[in-house]
Image: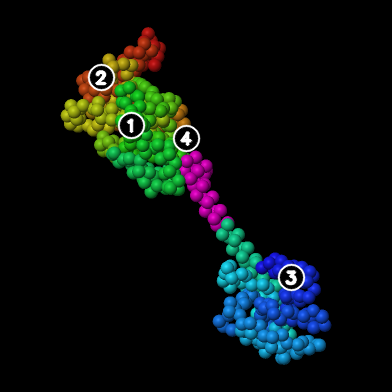
Amino acid sequence: MDDRLRRDNAENNDKSNSDTSRERDFQQWDFNTNAESEASDKKINPSVQIPKRFEVHIPESEDFPSFMPQSATRVPAPENRPAPAAPVSRPTSAPAASARPAAPGAQRPTRPVPVSGLRQPAPASRPTAQRKPAAAKPSAAAGRPAAAKAPDAKKAKPEEAKKAPKRKKNKADMAYNLAKGILTACVCLIFIATLTTVVTSVAFGFINDVLVIDDDNRDYSVVIEVPEGADYETIFDILTENGLVTQPLLTDFFLKFRHYDFQAAYDDETGELLYNEDGSVKQEAVKYQPGVYYVYADSGIENIFDSMLVNNSLNKGTVRLTFPEGFSIAEVFEKIEKNEVCEAEKLYANLEIVGEQYSFIKKLGDSEGRFLKAEGYLFPDTYDFYIGESASSVLEKLLNNFEVRWEKEYDERLKELGMSMNEIITIASIVQCEAKDGSQMADIAGVIHNRLNNSASYPTLDMDSTSDYVNSLKSFNILSDIEHSIYLESYNTYSKTGLPPGPICNPGATAIRAALYPTESTYYFFCHGNDGEVYYASTATEHQENVQKVVYGSVGGN
């Protein structure tokens, strides 16, 4: 639009310059320059209709009507504009704002409004585009009333409403804050100490269950009974109830991690692993030996479970041991310990408990002066043991063998003799120790029976082997000096009448049979020669002669 206007002005200027008689037919109307135009000698040609275009600016003091957009937009000229009025002679000075005529076809405000300038309207063939009023923020130039200036807050506030100065902390506040800080620190320290104590206690208990690092509980022991068919869970509950497990949760997790509940299945004949159909190793429940166990707290949880295992030979191997006739319990236990089957101490601890499961020992009752109840009932034979086998399992094998070897006819023979099993086993143990071999056993057993049947004339047995038994126990460091004196008096058959309080060894089948079926004779004495022969006598005089022959004669000394 502006370019077109400039082009028209240029054309008019050219025509005016070429024709001096013609007045300039176009001139922009500007109220700001009216006074200067009056002084000019150039006049506007009244024959030329000059279209006028106004830009209306609302003063800041007046508001927009509610129906008008509050934006600085140009007002288009009306399409049917009336013809301009005849030119009016202009005063020499700028007319007053109130005396200015209103533009035709427009409502002029009461106060003068400056006009930015006139522009040539677009040709009729080019319709003027109706632009939407922009939703822009109204500016001060567009007539938006200025916001009222907020009063100064500092000046508006009264003096008494001003913020009070901070109060200085006194000594009481400082003491309170200090006490509060100390109390908070103490609570935190107590919480941390308690948590540390709990964690340490749990960890120590678990480690002690596995490794036994607490010296105070090394002497603690307990007797437990494992029932028939007991599995891992049952045994674990029994150990927990008896105080052998202090941290059940962690210890149970550890034992299951070590496969004490389930383990790989092996073929009984070949020893090879068994597999499932999907190729995984077959698992089976671990089997445990039922019985009574004398368990020490210092054994450790793994050793306790190992001692109860039935198939522990898969990992530890076996050993075959032979116990000859005449071995005492001390000699049997010593050999078992040397071959790493079980500790002798645990065997002694379990001996009485396991023995009470068998009727032939349970009937014995308490006998004054008797060293061990089970002495004489650990049947001498060849046995296969597991390395590291439990004490109860070892003892059960020995006692079970005695129960099997005791024949039914022996019970009938006991009735005929009017004697108990314990008396027969005691006689058999003496025969076992006095005889060189089986050929002498029945004759020696006959001498013992004759003296027992004629106790009025022969109240004592006068057997050296009974005292030797007590002395041998002293050599194994089993008895103290005081105990040795007590048992020596009980087993001394030179001073004590009748049989000793119990067997002095574990006799074999030949000696037991000889005690049940002794040789009938009139002998009440016998002595041994260096050649191994036994010399019998019916009277004390004959016996003294035999002794003289053995000591000083051709027979040889004892």
Question: Which of marks 1 and 4 precedes in the sequence?
Answer: 1
Residue 447's spot in the image, x, y percent?
A: 27, 22
Which label is found at residue 278? 1
Which residue in the protein does label 2 denote?
A: 442
The one nearer the camera, 356 or 240, is: 240
Q: Which residue is mark 3?
A: 12
x, y percent for residue 90: 77, 87
Q: Amino acid at mark 2?
A: Ala
> Residue at 66% of width from left, 83% of height from top?
84
Residue at the location (45% across, 46% down)? 250
**Looking at the image, which residue is at 40% across and 28% down?**
315
Task: Locate the N terminus and report the quarter of the image it occupies.
Answer: bottom right
- Is disc 4 placed on a helix, strand or loop? helix
**Which residues, given as a range, are shown in magenta?**
193-216
Specify few, some or many for label 3: CA neighbours under 10 Å numbering under 14, 14-19, or 20 or more. Answer: some
Tell me, for residue 481, which label it has, or none: 4
